[in-house]
Amino acid sequence: MEILWHKKRWINYLILVLLGSGLIVFAAKNDAFLYRQPIMRISQVKNGHPEKTTDEYGNHDQQTQQVLTGKVLNGKHRGETFTLKNTFTRSHAEDQEFKSGQDIFLNLYSSKGKKTTAAFANYKRDVYLFLLVWLMLCLLLLVMRIRGLKAISSVLINFILFLLLVKLDISWNITNFFWIYAVGALLFTALSLLIVIGWNEQSRVTFAAVTSGTTAALGLAVLVMWLTHDNGMHYEALDFATQQPKQLFLASALIGLLGTVMDAATDIVSTVFELKRSQPELEFKQLFASGRQVGRSIMGPLINVLLLIFFTETFALAILYFRTGNTISYTFQWTMSLGLVQAIISGIGITLVIPAASFLAAWRLEWKQHHDNA
Amino acid sequence: MTTLKMLIIVLAILVILVGGKKGFMALSSFGINFCLLFLSIILIAGGFPPVAVAAFSGICILAITIFMSDCGEKEANTAFIATLIVLLLMILLIAPLDHLMQIQGFSTEDSEEVEAFNLAIGISFESILLATTVLSTLGAIAEAAIAVASGMHELIIQSPNISAKDLRHSGQIIGFQIMGMTFNTLFFGMFGSNLALFILLDKLQVNFGYYLNSKIFVGETCLVLYSAIAVVAVIGVTIELVVKRSNVFQQQ
């Protein structure tokens, strides 16, 4: 009986998810009136004859011209028909092939007495972004129930704080902008711990552990950079850098480092506190040892998480380098080394926070016991 | 000596100091995974199909991360099966969505970086993206699966007569802690690696619609969302697998 009921609830849930997805897709597909930039729905596509291309490294590809026609969905030019050209390659590195029914943003150029002309500005992707967010929320609710929303709200609040920091950085425009992010890191830590753990002894100890671990790791990294005179660090390879690249690199390394160090510290401190709660007779030495035990077992997987996150981001660029006749060492230096350095700094942070968190948690509990007894 | 080499030496010393024998294992699995990733890049650049290469190295990375980690054989088996199921599910989710979203390759913001290159290199950037997205989620799902599986096995050993409902409930509690913290790693990782981009976008004073539609921003956001979905999914799958197999474990 219970299983039957369970099955029925499953089906209801599935229907709800699908219905919600349908609604979101329908709404987002018709949200053109919310945008100021003109959006065109492609109604007709004429593909030219594909041309074979070969570059000096023997890479074969195909280039195709297409003519797109469609009607504008919003704004002043609503209902008008425009035609524009597009070129795409088979590998789609920086281009794409359009099909009828897709929506694109346009830049319209009009001058007096002449016909308004249109150029492609951007592809409309919001439909799928909303859909993916919806799917994630549904899955989170299914697996974690209401608790899952707490984790998401922590992320959202941190994201807003992050955007505010970026705004501050730009409006103040100070030379040592690294310190804006350093102070921000303290706020990030405090906020996340408050939301996930709450305001208590445990979160205070975790905060101290995260701060000391992060500072020590970044300090050590800066020391190594100074000792080796930044040998082999191509800061100019940093994408989108509009400020002093080395500081920018350190700031992004700090934020990346913070997440993992928090991950490790929370695990260790909560285990030590839990142990003391269930077995109050445990002393400093045993608590310290079991904290380090936890740390050791999470260290390996965590360092691997970092390697995968930072390394896979460089895949596309590295393949482009290899295909255009660059050597392995040159490609490595210019596309991967900065990401790898960032992963290694975070790895150092994990190793340093393990003894720090174990010591702080065990010491604090021991101190508290003496204090209570006295 | 280059900075990278010295940092690697510092990390190696610290890992072994803190972790001892386990540290050595962690270091070797880091090394093997690095070589696997590097090999995948070279194979894809050499013309092998990206998705097949990623599936192969992905399964190897999962096996290495899980079986070289510090947990029992039964837990490792459960975790490995759970991650394989999620790996397959993620490919089924990512492939159609990425095709619809068209976030592969390089964006207009990247054009300065790649303008010296002829981009028609004859490899489908869509499949490269699928390969990298799947690979980037693996570390996080392996970590979550190991933690949930070993936590629940511990519980079964402590109280062998635990009911399926209680077991599932404690699995959710363990999973919640893991998830909250893994989200931190993922999202701060994303903020950190995209700090320069965020500064640039703010300087350009782009509007809200840009964030919802631009290739680069949607692409980066999806990468994190996929990882988050994969982590939540792997927690759910691991819980169900342990509950299903718990009778077998209890009899042994």
Image: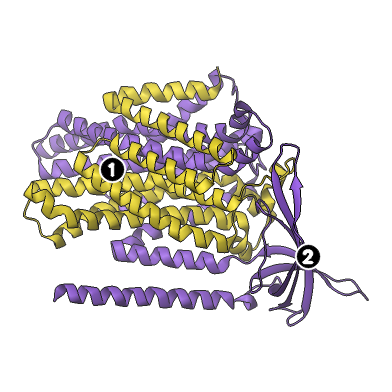
Question: Are there few (<14), some (14-19), or many (20+) residues within 10 Å of tag 2?
Answer: some
Q: Which mark is residue A85?
A: 2
Image quarter of the N terminus of chain A: bottom left
Give the colour of chain B. yellow
Three-letter code, disc 2 = Lys
Q: For marks 2 and 1, give the one nearer the viewer.
A: 2
**Residue B213 drawn at (x, y percent):** 61, 63
Residue sitting at x 60%, y 22%: A231
Chain that is purple in the image: A
Q: Secondary structure at mark 2?
A: strand
**Would residue A123 appear left or right of A204 to someone viewing this image?**
right
Residue sitting at x 52%, y 25%: B4
Residue A349 can be seen in this image: yes
Q: Quadrant of residue A242?
A: top right
Residue sitting at x 72%, y 36%: A57
Q: Are marks 2 and 1 on the same chain?
A: yes
| Count of numbered labels shown in the rendering | 2
**Residue A352 drawn at (x, y percent):** 36, 30
Where is mark 1, residue-wise? Answer: A267
Q: Secondary structure at mark 1?
A: helix
